[in-house]
Amino acid sequence: MILPTGLPFGAGYLSVFWIVPAAILAYKVLTFGSREKHLPPGPPTVPVLGNAHLIPTRGFFSKLKEWSDQYGPVYSLKIGRSTMIVLNDRRAVHELLSQKGAWYNDRPTDQQLVVATREENIALMHESPKWRAERKIASSFFSPKRLDSDMRPVQEAEVARLMSDLLAKPERFQEYIKRTTASVASITIYGHLATDWGSFWAYAVYIAMEAISKAIEPGTYLPVDQFPILNLIPDRWNTPKQRGKKFYVTMTDIWNEARDRVEARRRNGDKRDSLLDKLLEEDIKCDVPLSYTELNNFLGGVHMGASDTTATATLTSVLFLARHPEFQEKARVELDRVCGTERPPKWADFHDLPYINCIVKEGLRIRPVIPGGIPHFARQDHWFDGMLIPAGSTIMVPAYALNHSSESSSDPSAYNPDQFMDRAGKLAPELAAASRYNELAHHSPDPVGIQDRARGGGRREAFGVGYELRRIRGRVLAYAEEVQRALCSEKREAWRGFGKRIC
């Protein structure tokens, strides 16, 4: 039998050996970035990029809300080879991150984060024995019992200082609030107070926060995890990577100096009741050994989380109160009823000051501190309402989108603390343990409720929830108290114009 020497259209048999691989390669390229079957719906994809071309460099959180309105509360994005699942649904957040927390406890791999933090920031590191050991230390030290006993005098003293500062120079409210927040954190973690804005203990934490924001801001660095071919770019041409390395040096230098100052104090025989003092004394022991920089950056990470988020949330409430004097007046009336003019409010007054708590909750709802959330990592496949949540996908819980849904508020864009009156007396631990996911959705500064799931969720829920909420509530109380005092003093006119000046 004689075989024909060629194929139709003039093709030779040898052509098959490159046509077939070429066809397979073309198929791989054309389907790279496409949405797989059974994934939640989402924006149309294009070959290779998927939805990467749609990701904005700024305002990502508002885009997540826009896509949710268009594609539903649970949707997917394709970024190159990776899959992102966005949960803008309270039930989905509760069932996945709370009930199945162990499956979503980790963080996705992000080379920029690894470069910038070297797995030494507790909020951003992967789940590991080191992470569990550090979390155990922080959770124990910032327990509700310690917050209401050992740390309460610190809180009340710093709030009293803030009240004095605000009354003297209200136009410097932003500086005073940030100093107070940093000071409470530095006292509890390092045993040193921030005497003024020029103090290392006041400004250093905000330098570190600004640096990390620039180093890991979404959309500002190469997506090498989603597009592995980008790993071929030499480091010397990869400016964002160099920025990440620079941040690590900045962060480590700051927290090394903080430890040096504590050790210098201790060498002079001055030992205090701070977290670092207890670690150095071995009154508190870590379950795994930590290097010099690992311990310093662990404590620095706690300081950053405690200071910046609390200051931001407090400033949000102050600004909205200044713009809405009608709600400010309700707070003043409540303070008059409970405290009169003879004394400032204290933590013991919490249950008698429900409207103050409503103000805190509404500030956290309308302007969440981390509006887009911090990503989780899915360990295994899971089905939700007929949609596949695949293993290896990134899970996002966008606090801004959740808090501005029609479920959260009848008028999400309007500032209205009154809507929280039916649950004003509930504290973070109660809501964290609640079985009703619709209650969880209305609480948070990142910690607890939907917004805590945005930052942590499940086993990643922030350990200092009560700590942060007490601090925010204290600052709002200070602001409301000083408005009350000022309206009864010669500064009445200055305070009446305060809202207009700061808005």
Image (spheres, rainbow, N blue to C red):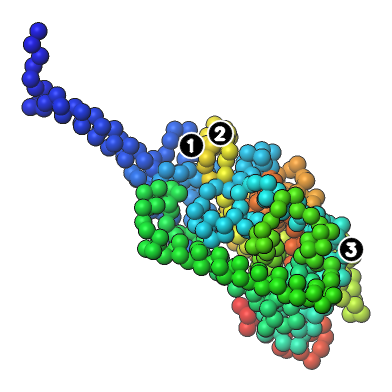
Task: Indicate the amino acid at tag 2.
Answer: Asp
Quadrant in the picture for residue 134? bottom right
Sequence order check: which comes first, mark 3 or mark 2? 3
Q: Which residue is nearer to you in this view: 126 or 163? A: 126
Residue 163 shown left or right of residue 318 in the figure: right
Residue shown at the point (49%, 57%) measured from the top left:
112
Mark number for residue 381?
2
Neighbours of disc 3 within 10 Å: few (<14), some (14-19), many (20+): few
Task: Indicate the amino acid at tag 3.
Answer: Ser
Q: Which residue is nearer to you in this view: 379 or 411? A: 379
Front: mark 3 or 1? 3
Task: Indicate the amino acid at tag 1.
Answer: Leu
Residue located farthest toward the right when viewing the structure as drawn: 342
Mark number for residue 39?
1
Front: mark 1 or 2? 2
Neighbours of disc 1 within 10 Å: few (<14), some (14-19), many (20+): some
Residue shown at the point (69%, 38%) measured from the top left:
99
Q: Which residue is mark 3?
A: 149
Residue located farthest toward the top when viewing the structure as drawn: 1
Query: Where residue 188 sits: x, y (%)?
Result: 79, 67
- Marks 3 and 2 sit apart, C-alpha to C-alpha, by 44 Å
